[in-house]
Image: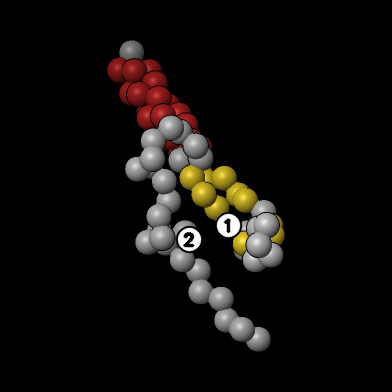
Amino acid sequence: MKKILIALMILGLCLTTTIAEARGRGVFVRGYYRSNGTYVRPHYHSAPDGLRWNNYGRASSQQRREYKAY
């Protein structure tokens, strides 16, 4: 009985972690041209959840990628 309870607790923890990780993923935005002609590179932004403070910012390591000119 104890082994079954421990196995169920571990399974529940794994499922909770997986679901939380899936919700936290960003949404990929393809590159596009704005109306003034500037090109916006492809990037990720946080999935909309209704909270203004819960978004990727400029300091996010996922947004700050350095590109080198050829």
Residue 32 left/right relative to 67: right
Instruction: Look at 51% across and 74% down and name the residue there.
Output: 66
* Above/below status of 58 relative to 66: above
Q: Amino acid at mark 1?
A: His
Q: Earlier in the sequence, mark 1 or mark 2?
A: 1
Residue 19 in percent (x, y) is at 47, 32
Q: Nearer the viewer, residue 4 or 65?
A: 65
Instruction: Look at 39% across and 21% down and name the residue there.
Output: 8
Q: Amino acid at mark 2?
A: Gln
Q: Nearer the viewer, residue 32 or 14?
A: 32
Residue indicated by mark 1:
43
Q: Nearer the viewer, residue 22 or 15?
A: 22
Marks 1 and 2, how far apart at CA: 7 Å
CB contact under 8 Å: marks 1 and 2:
yes
Quarter-of-image position of residue 41 = bottom right
Quarter-of-image position of residue 54 = top left
* Residue 14 seen: no
Residue indicated by mark 2:
63
* Furthest residue toward top: 1
Q: Locate the N terminus by quadrant.
A: top left
Residue 26 in percent (x, y) is at 52, 46
* Residue 8 seen: yes
Instruction: Look at 30% across and 17% down and name the residue there.
Output: 2
Badge 2: how crowded within 10 Å, few (<14), some, or many (20+)? few
* Furthest residue toward left: 2
Residue 15 in percent (x, y) is at 45, 29
Q: Locate the C terminus by quadrant.
A: bottom right
* Furthest residue toward front: 36
Badge 1: how crowded within 10 Å, few (<14), some, or many (20+)? few
Instruction: Look at 57% across and 81% down and name the residue there.
Output: 68
For the residue labelled by badge 1, is the local secondary structure a helix, a strand or a loop? strand
* Above/below status of 30 relative to 49: below
